Image (tube, coloured by chain):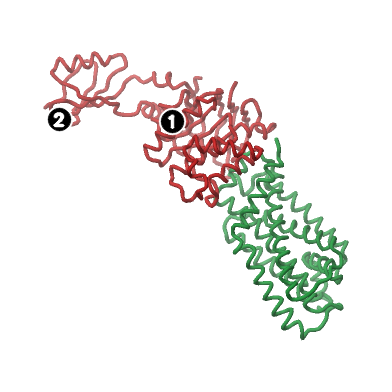
Chain colours: A red, B green
């Protein structure tokens, strides 16, 4: 079953700007799905329509089989939204934010209290339950929004740039939380500008640009399309010039650092053999750029305004 | 889907909100009206004599109570809902499976409750200055509730259409306050020249204040039945308009 189905979804704002140009998208139940795109591509508009914050111009949205227009309450009950910016009442305590949210979804007081305790403990916020929310740190506020979105146990969790502006430690802990939530059966749709985040968390991906879906695939297939991977090698000893290696492009960055472009058919074993033969000892290796980032840029660059959308899922 | 829980959640949240800030919401009307009663009712009123058989103090008490109900029911909804928009907490309600009528009902109920609570506070203050024998409790209560409903709805519409904090103070300052003062709080409309009497009859607040005055002390310048028709008409019109705005997402959705 699809957690989400969009059909020919269009949005034209009052100023005439066409933010969505008839997109089709399916997200399977249980998936961890990335919706990516540059700023102004239309992903926030799409999420706004799915979560009823923006009125669509035409097209349809179905959430777990419930049409958002015809079965509004049932469709909305399935969704939990974590928005980009803090949007809870900053004068409320953490606990009351979750209890109010539970009330909006019709949870009884007893169940609301149970779910509030569960979600706050899951997000490591139980000790802060009586704290007025404006006194929380930025990372804690983000976690409050995730806990709030989960309090009514939604089947579909939409995370709109949940880790924007948080430090790497909090980001990692939030990734772990998101993975746990997904493993418990909740479908997750994630938008993010951190492509490393999408690559490590998501199984399927759609890229939106200029209001069109320009890519819709599973992450593994997408990454498999990379023909060349770029690595940075740290060397044990300094070298005077870049070595010449058959089949690879190589560049000397510093006397102890090399940048290597390795074609997909060229194994790393062969690369290391070639380097060993030239008496070059490698102490460490890392990806020069994030692989998804490279594909993302390729797709965005190859789909300028007015080009035809593609989708291969 | 149990909408009664969502409704109760909104109403409870609203009540806690204005009780939490009671020095801004409940204390000022107590002080302001005490000064009204002291200065206009006692010091000046003793020299004015009676109007329609009632002492001046007794005459102005109903108007001041209802004026407080009007301003506070309006202020509660307009400030609360606009803040909800401004802080974007409105998104919590829009994303949740709550019908528009429950959102409207919740906020308007919050406004009615605050309006009536302030009305009770002002009534208690008035008892320090005069003894009132209630003429018709049913009319007094129903007019108070209906009036609070009208102005809570009006406050809701103002909040939806407002784009800045300035926009939520324009109507109270430049419409509600003048209409309330010109609505016969401190005088009988019969004391005006006939042309101003006719103009005053176009002021809906005049009907509400006089009907409430009839309920409390049995004195009125207007037809009570007409007051129920006017307030009922306003409630239906404003409710439908509010629901239309919510349905279209005007002022609250992108």
Q: Is residue A110 above or below residue B30?
A: above
**Residue A58 or residue A204, whichever sits in front:** A204
Pick the quarter of the image with the N terminus of chain A. Answer: top right
**Residue A247 or residue B16, whichever sits in front:** B16
The residues bearing labels 1 and 2 have C-alpha atoms spaced at a distance of 39 Å
**Residue B204 or residue B217, whichever sits in front:** B217
Q: How many marks?
A: 2
Where disc 2 sits, the SS reads loop
* Residue A73 appears in view: yes
Residue A283 is labelled as none
Residue placed under numbered mark 2 in the picture: A255
Q: Is residue B122 above or below residue A58?
A: below
Residue A176 is labelled as 1
Give me the residue at 66% from left, 47% from top.
B10
Q: Chain of mark 2?
A: A
* A58 sits to left or right of B146: left
* Residue A306 appears in view: no
Q: Chain of mark 1?
A: A
Q: Which residue is outermost to the bottom?
A: B47
Q: Earlier in the sequence, mark 1 or mark 2?
A: 1
Question: Residue A269, position in %: x, y?
Answer: 25, 14
Q: Is residue B97 above or below residue A2?
A: below
């Amino acid at each position: 079953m699809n957690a989400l189905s969009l059909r020919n979804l269009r949005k034209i704002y009052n100023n005439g700007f066409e933010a969505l140009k008839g997109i089709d998208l399916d997200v399977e139940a249980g998936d961890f799905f990335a919706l990516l795109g540059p700023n102004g591509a239309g992903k926030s508009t799409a999420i706004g329509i799915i979560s009823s914050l923006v009125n669509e111009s035409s097209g349809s949205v179905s959430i777990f089989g419930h049409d958002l227009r015809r079965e509004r309450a049932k469709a909305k009950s399935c969704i939990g939204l974590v928005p980009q910016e803090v949007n809870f009442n900053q004068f409320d305590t953490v606990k009351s934010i979750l209890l109010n949210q539970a009330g909006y979804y019709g949870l009884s007081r007893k169940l609301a209290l149970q779910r509030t305790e569960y979600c706050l403990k899951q997000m490591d916020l139980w000790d802060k339950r009586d704290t007025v929310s404006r006194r929380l740190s930025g990372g804690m506020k983000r976690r409050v929004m995730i806990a709030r979105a989960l309090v009514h146990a939604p089947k579909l969790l939409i995370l709109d740039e949940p880790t924007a502006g948080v430090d790497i430690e909090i980001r990692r802990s939030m990734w772990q939380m998101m993975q746990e939530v997904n493993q418990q059966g909740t479908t997750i749709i994630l938008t993010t500008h951190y492509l490393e985040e999408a690559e490590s968390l998501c199984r399927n991906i759609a890229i939106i640009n200029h209001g069109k879906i320009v890519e819709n695939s599973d992450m593994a297939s997408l990454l498999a399309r990379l023909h060349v991977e770029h690595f940075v090698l740290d060397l044990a000893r300094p070298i005077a010039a870049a070595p010449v290696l058959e089949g690879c492009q190589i560049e000397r960055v510093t006397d102890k650092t090399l940048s290597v472009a390795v074609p997909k058919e060229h194994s790393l074993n062969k690369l290391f053999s070639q380097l060993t033969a030239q008496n070059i000892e490698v102490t460490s290796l890392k990806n020069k750029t994030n692989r998804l980032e490279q594909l993302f840029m390729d797709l965005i660059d190859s789909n300028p305004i007015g080009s035809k959308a593609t989708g291969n899922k | 889907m149990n909408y009664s829980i969502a409704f109760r959640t909104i109403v409870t949240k609203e009540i806690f909100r204005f009780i939490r800030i009671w020095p801004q919401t409940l204390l000022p009307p107590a002080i302001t009206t005490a000064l009204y009663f002291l200065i206009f009712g006692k010091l000046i009123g003793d020299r004015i004599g009676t109007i329609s058989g009632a002492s001046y103090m007794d005459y102005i008490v109903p108007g001041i109570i209802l004026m407080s109900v009007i301003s506070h029911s309006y202020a509660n909804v307009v400030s609360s809902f606009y803040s909800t928009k401004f802080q974007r907490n409105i998104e919590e309600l829009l994303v949740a499976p709550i019908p528009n009528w429950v959102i409207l009902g919740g906020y308007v109920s919050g406004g009615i409750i605050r309006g009536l609570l302030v009305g009770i506070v002002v009534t208690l203050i008035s008892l320090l200055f005069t003894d009132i024998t209630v003429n018709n409790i049913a009319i007094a209560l129903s007019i108070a509730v209906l009036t609070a409903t009208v102005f809570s709805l009006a406050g809701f519409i103002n909040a939806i259409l407002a784009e800045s904090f300035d926009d939520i103070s324009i109507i109270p300052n430049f419409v509600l306050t003048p209409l309330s003062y010109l609505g016969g709080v401190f005088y009988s409309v019969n004391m005006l020249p006939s042309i101003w009497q006719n103009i005053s009859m176009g002021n809906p607040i005049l009907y509400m204040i006089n009907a409430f005055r009839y309920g409390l002390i049995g004195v009125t310048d207007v037809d009570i039945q007409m007051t129920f028709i006017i307030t009922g008409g306003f409630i239906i019109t404003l409710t439908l308009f509010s629901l239309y705005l919510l349905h279209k997402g005007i002022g609250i959705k992108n």
